[in-house]
Image (cartoon, rainbow, N blue to C red):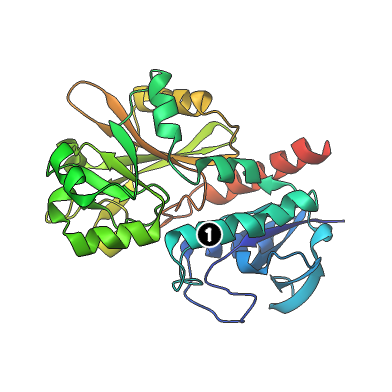
C-alpha cells in the first residue's frame, strides 16, 4: 500500500475550490506523483486544516476534490502557503490563524515536514538574536515593540537602516527608515506587534545567496540579485532576478553551521546569506514556505523522492 502525503498548495484553495495560479514547485509534485511507486500525493490549502477530521483535499490520482480523513495521511508537507488566500488579514492575524490550523496536525499526531513547533519558533525572527549570541555572523538586528514612538525610531536609527515586520513575508513592508512617514509607520503598528530594525548592508546589491537543505544536507542554491533601483531581493515581484548558483565550500559550511546552531531540528530549510568584504553573513533562515525558486528539474525530482522516502523511514521505521 502506498503512503499518503498531503502538500499545502496555496494556488488551490480546498475550502472555496478557487484556483489561484500554477507554481513550478507544485508542478514537480504532480510529476513526482505520476512517477513515484510508493507515495500518493494530495494538495490541500492550510485553511482546510480544522478540528474536523474529514477535510477537503485535491486528489492527484483522480484529479478532483474529495474528502479524506486527516488521520489517513502519513505526513503533511507545508510546502507553499502564500498570502493569496487571506489578503484581508493582517500579518499578525494571518500567522495566528496559520499556527492555529497547523496545530491540528499535532492534535492528530500527523508527522509534519518541518514540525509545527519549528514553525511556532521561527515564525518571528527572534532566532537572529539567539544565533548572534552563539557567535554566528548575523546581520546586525534589533527588535522593537511596534508601539515604539515614531519620533524615537527616527532619532535612534540611521536613515539607511531597514525596517520590517518581525513576522513578515514576501518583502511586504520592508523599507529604509528614510522611506517612512507617520502614516506608513501606523501600517506597521496595525500589521504586527514587533518590528525588526537591521543595518543596511550595501553588499546586497551583488546578490543574496539562498542555500537549500533537505534534512541538513545541502541540496541546491540560487542567487537573488536586486533590481538596480531596488535593494529588495525577495523575488521577481520586486524586480529581482535569480539564477542557479554554485556555492563555495565555505558558503556551504557556514550555512550548515547556521542550521546546526539553530535551536530546532529542521527537515527542510533555506539559508539566506550574503558575502561582505570580510566575511559571510546570515540574513535569515526560512522554514515556512521557503520559496524554492525552481526553474529547472535536473536532479530535483530524484532528490525530492529520496527525501520523502527517508522522512517516512525515519517516522515509521519502514
Please state which of residues 218 and 82 is positioned toward the viewer in this rendering. Answer: 82
Residue 246 is situated, as x and y percent measured from the top left of the image, at: 35, 36
Q: Which residue is mark 1?
A: 80
Q: Quadrant of residue 311?
A: top right
**Residue drawn at x 64%, y 77% as measured from the top left:** 15
Does dot 1 land on a helix, a strand or a loop? Answer: loop
**Residue at (41%, 51%) from the top-left corner?**
193
Q: Position of residue 185 (x, y in %)?
A: 25, 58
Left or right of residue 24, residue 227 in this image:
left
| Residue nearer the viewer, 111 or 105 | 105
Q: Quadrant of residue 10?
A: bottom right
Q: Quadrant of the C terminus?
A: top right
- Answer with left or right where residue 294 lies relative to residue 187: right
Residue drawn 45% across the image and 51% down it? 292
Q: Quadrant of the N terminus?
A: bottom right
* Coordinates of residue 130 in the picture (x, y in percent): 44, 27
> Residue 16's x, y, as percent?
61, 81
User: From this viewpoint, is residue 159 visible?
Assistant: yes
Amino acid at each position: 500500500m502506498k503512503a499518503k502525503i498531503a502538500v499545502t498548495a496555496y494556488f488551490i484553495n480546498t475550502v472555496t475550490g478557487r484556483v489561484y495560479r500554477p507554481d513550478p514547485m507544485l508542478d514537480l509534485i504532480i510529476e513526482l506523483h505520476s512517477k513515484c511507486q510508493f507515495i500518493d500525493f494530495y494538495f490541500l490549502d492550510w485553511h482546510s486544516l480544522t478540528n474536523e477530521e474529514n477535510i477537503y483535499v485535491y486528489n492527484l490520482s483522480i484529479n478532483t476534490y474529495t474528502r479524506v480523513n486527516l488521520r489517513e495521511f502519513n505526513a503533511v508537507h507545508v510546502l507553499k502557503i502564500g498570502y493569496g488566500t487571506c489578503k484581508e488579514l493582517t500579518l499578525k492575524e494571518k500567522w495566528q490563524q496559520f499556527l492555529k490550523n497547523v496545530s491540528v496536525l499535532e492534535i492528530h499526531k500527523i508527522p509534519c515536514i518541518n514540525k509545527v513547533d519549528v514553525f511556532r519558533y521561527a515564525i518571528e525572527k527572534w532566532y537572529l538574536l539567539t544565533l548572534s549570541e552563539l557567535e554566528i555572523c548575523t546581520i546586525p538586528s534589533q527588535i522593537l515593540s511596534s508601539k515604539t514612538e515614531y519620533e524615537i525610531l527616527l532619532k535612534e536609527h540611521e536613515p539607511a537602516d531597514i525596517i520590517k515586520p518581525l513576522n513578515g513575508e514576501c518583502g511586504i513592508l520592508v523599507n529604509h527608515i528614510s522611506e517612512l512617514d507617520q502614516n506608513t509607520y501606523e501600517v506597521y503598528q496595525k500589521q504586527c506587534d514587533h518590528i525588526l530594525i537591521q543595518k543596511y548592508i550595501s553588499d546586497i546589491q551583488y546578490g543574496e545567496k539562498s542555500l537549500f537543505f533537505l534534512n541538513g544536507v545541502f541540496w541546491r542554491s540560487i542567487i537573488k540579485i536586486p533590481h538596480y533601483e531596488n535593494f529588495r531581493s525577495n523575488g521577481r515581484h520586486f524586480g529581482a532576478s535569480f539564477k542557479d548558483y554554485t556555492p563555495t565550500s565555505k558558503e556551504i559550511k557556514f550555512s550548515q553551521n547556521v542550521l546546526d546552531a539553530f535551536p530546532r531540528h529542521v527537515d527542510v530549510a533555506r539559508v539566506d546569506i550574503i558575502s561582505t568584504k570580510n566575511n559571510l553573513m546570515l540574513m535569515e533562515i526560512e522554514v515556512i514556505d521557503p520559496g524554492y525558486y525552481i526553474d529547472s528539474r535536473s536532479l530535483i525530482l530524484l532528490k525530492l523522492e529520496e527525501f520523502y522516502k527517508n522522512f517516512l523511514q525515519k517516522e515509521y521505521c519502514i
